[in-house]
Image (cartoon, grey):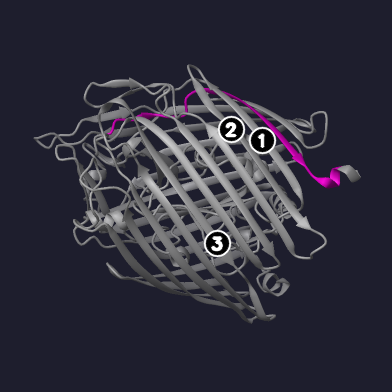
């Protein structure tokens, strides 16, 4: 592997970004290497989150933000929402059944627009292509998060239209150790987040190359203890009625380059609202999935590498198994996917990558149709099956003039036909200044239910232009700025008819946003600090009324045009750190569903400041024992997220004030030798 790293050694300058992952897990650096890379001016961590090539983080051909395990632990982040809130461009919106998903650069990203990956496994469920955020995955198991702030369809296909969130967990990487974490949280008026997480890794010295790991986490929690008010005068307390109870199990074994890993996730939730109005009693909605992956790596020569991968995904989403419920829904999805990638270091300055990707998807009714929301697929089918085949290529040339990345992906789906997306990236350094110019096409592929509920629904198409510049201001300091222009053609629009209880999807019009994002970072022996700012405006032609705010042409529904963040960690003592977090979110607008005369109620959400404070003590009494305590939403702000389309759902309270303590113990056999 040293040949690959050496041929890509010429950097394009320092950036706030990094990556890790082709359409599958790359050769992940050790935790120590990752932490070293974050402290040095020239990060040596290698990754593939934004390219098929293995590049240094600062040479990644995309706008990428990376967050290390130490940064996550020091900040006291409780889940992915806490982490993403501090990433430029990201905010959140509420969707049906009380679920919360991501918005990015002013555009609603919940259904198939933002891709979540955990250890090479694509987590978006297959029926609607959504993800569910909030107490969803134990952050204690995360070694690194890499966020591609831009399109990733060339690498990942039709669920990576706007952004990619790549999560790397403890997994097989690293040395023999054991981890135990317990958390206890309390809201002002009710239960907070509580969890117990256990994890162990074993490297078998008697059999060179053999290792194994296993992790399990059980949790309880609720989204808020505040009162939810709908657009129709109804209200209900979310205390005890907005539960988020996760279960996560991981396991895997590896022998040299051959690896088998599995991930099981279950999230049991409840909500006081399903679509728009307060419910007579809280409704339960469950999400469950199982992911398995088998991968290997072959190196016929020093310059050729072949990586085959096989994935199996089984799951159920938005499940309400109560047949007496008007929201009864019980369907299962399955995906079997095989991928093969080949890399060739043709010359010291050129790496070529190509491969194929074949997937078979199936949706199946698990209970009779005609009850609640349970309807047949495509009007009359209990089972549907689809085939998707893709081919991709990329050339990565690192030369003295400029680094050039050219790539493309072609996909053909058995229902909605073909999609072709190219991209071109130029990277160049000028002393302490580095720059990137990026052009990308991307697409969002309809999910199983998008097809079933749509009328000849087809992929939406996106074109993105990005410019990024990074300046190294001195030792441990960097400032990055990027500008973007995103245009979406034929977006897939969701609609719900409250009178008939029916859903529908259709392609309609155009969307677009333009803006800037800034990121300043400072590191030193005293700790670290980061300041971020993001801004967008609707750009180009925007004629999709579902996302527009009546009388407010300078904002999309639900998502703030301005967001500023300040995070940091100060080492008070060698073993004690204090980490404040401040997030200022600008004005937002919530839009109700149109009435009979086509008039929608517009509710203005005033700017809100979210303050968190976390204190962490390391090696308390014995090496490896850590105690943390934090208060979240210190000011008790009435913080709510709106629905980013005019579906009638009023703003939902999130980020209630919470007091939390965390006890962590890491045992490494090497401690006994010290």
Residue farthest to the top, as pictured: 189
Q: Which residues are magenta?
A: 649-671
Categorize mark 1 by other alpha carbons within 10 Å: few (<14), some (14-19), many (20+): many
| Residue at image location 30% in from the left, 47% down from the top | 367
Categorize mark 2 by other alpha carbons within 10 Å: few (<14), some (14-19), many (20+): many
Query: Quick check: marks 1 and 2 in contact, CB under 8 Å?
Result: yes
Residue that label 2 marks? 195
Measured in 3D between alpha carbons, the distance from the residue under mark 1 to the one under mark 3, in whole angstroms, is 26 Å
The local secondary structure at tag 3 comes to strand
Tag shown at residue 293 = 3
At which x and y percent is residue 143?
64, 48
Q: Is residue 513 above or below residue 411?
A: above
Quadrant of the drawing holding the C terminus: top right
**First reached walking from the N terminus: tag 1 or tag 3:** 1
Residue that label 1 marks? 181
- The answer to whether residue 135 is seen in the rendering is no
Query: Quick check: marks 1 and 3 in contact, CB under 8 Å?
Result: no
Residue farthest to the left, as pictured: 597
**First reached walking from the N terminus: tag 2 or tag 3:** 2
Measured in 3D between alpha carbons, the distance from the residue under mark 1 to the one under mark 2, in whole angstroms, is 8 Å
């Amino acid at each position: 592997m040293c040949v690959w790293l050496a041929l890509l050694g010429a950097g394009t300058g320092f950036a706030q970004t990094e990556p890790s992952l082709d359409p599958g897990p790359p050769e992940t650096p050790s935790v120590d290497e990752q932490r070293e890379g974050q402290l040095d001016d020239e990060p040596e961590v290698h990754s593939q989150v934004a390219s098929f090539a293995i590049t240094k983080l600062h040479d990644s051909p995309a706008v990428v933000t990376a967050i290390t395990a130490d940064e996550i632990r020091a900040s006291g982040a409780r889940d992915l929402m806490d982490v993403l809130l501090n990433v430029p461009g990201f905010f959140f919106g509420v969707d049906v059944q009380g679920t919360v998903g991501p918005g990015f650069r002013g555009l609603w990203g919940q259904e198939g627009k933002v891709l979540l990956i955990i250890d090479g496994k694509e987590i978006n469920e297959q029926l609607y292509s959504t993800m569910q955020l909030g107490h969803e995955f134990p952050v204690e198991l995360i070694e690194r998060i890499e966020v591609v702030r831009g399109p990733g369809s060339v690498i990942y296909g039709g669920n990576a239209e706007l952004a990619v969130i790549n999560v790397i967990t403890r997994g097989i990487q690293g040395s023999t150790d054991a981890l135990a974490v317990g958390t206890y949280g309390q809201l002002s008026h009710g239960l907070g987040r509580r969890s117990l997480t256990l994890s162990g890794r074993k490297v078998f010295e008697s059999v060179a190359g053999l290792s194994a790991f296993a992790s399990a986490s059980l949790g309880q929690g609720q989204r808020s203890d505040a009162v939810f008010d709908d657009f129709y005068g109804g209200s209900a307390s979310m205390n005890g009625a907005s539960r988020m109870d996760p279960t996560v199990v991981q396991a895997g074994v590896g022998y040299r380059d051959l690896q088998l890993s599995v991930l099981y996730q279950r999230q049991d939730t409840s909500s006081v609202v399903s679509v728009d109005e307060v419910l007579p009693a809280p409704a339960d909605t469950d999400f469950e999935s199982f992911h398995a992956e088998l991968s290997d790596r072959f190196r016929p020569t020093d310059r050729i590498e072949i990586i085959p991968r096989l994935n199996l995904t089984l799951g159920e989403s938005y499940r309400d198994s109560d047949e007496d419920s008007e929201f009864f829904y019980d369907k299962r999805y399955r995906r079997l996917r095989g991928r093969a990638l080949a890399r060739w270091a043709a010359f010291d300055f050129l790496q070529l990558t190509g491969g194929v990707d074949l997937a078979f998807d199936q949706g199946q009714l698990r209970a009779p149709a005609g009850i609640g929301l349970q309807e047949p697929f495509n009007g009359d089918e209990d089972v549907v099956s689809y085939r998707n085949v893709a081919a991709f290529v990329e050339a990565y040339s690192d030369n003295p003039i400029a680094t050039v990345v050219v790539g493309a992906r072609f996909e053909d789906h058995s229902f909605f036909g073909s999609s072709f997306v190219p991209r071109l990236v130029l990277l160049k350094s000028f002393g302490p200044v580095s720059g990137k110019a990026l052009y990308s096409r991307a697409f969002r592929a309809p999910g199983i239910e998008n097809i079933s509920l749509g009328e000849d629904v087809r992929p939406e198409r996106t074109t993105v232009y990005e410019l990024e510049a990074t300046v190294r201001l001195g030792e441990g300091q960097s400032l990055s700025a990027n500008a973007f222009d995103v245009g979406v053609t034929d977006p897939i629009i969701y609609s719900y008819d409250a009178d008939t209880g029916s859903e529908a999807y259709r392609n309609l019009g155009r969307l677009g946003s333009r803006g800037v994002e800034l990121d300043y970072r400072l590191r030193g022996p005293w700790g670290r600090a980061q300041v971020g700012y993001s801004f967008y405006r609707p750009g180009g032609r925007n004629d999709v009324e579902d996302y527009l705010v009546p009388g407010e042409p300078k904002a999309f529904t639900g998502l703030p045009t301005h967001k500023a963040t300040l995070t940091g960690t100060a080492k008070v003592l060698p073993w004690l750190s204090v980490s404040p977090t401040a997030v200022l979110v600008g004005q937002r607008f919530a839009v109700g569903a149109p009435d009979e005369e086509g008039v929608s109620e517009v509710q203005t959400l005033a700017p809100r400041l979210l303050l968190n404070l976390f204190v962490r003590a390391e090696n308390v009494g014995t090496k490896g024992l850590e105690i943390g305590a934090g208060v979240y939403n210190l000011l008790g702000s009435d913080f709510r997220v709106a629905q980013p389309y005019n579906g009638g759902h009023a703003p939902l309270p999130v980020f209630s004030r919470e007091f939390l303590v965390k006890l962590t113990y890491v045992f490494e056999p090497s401690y006994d030798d010290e």
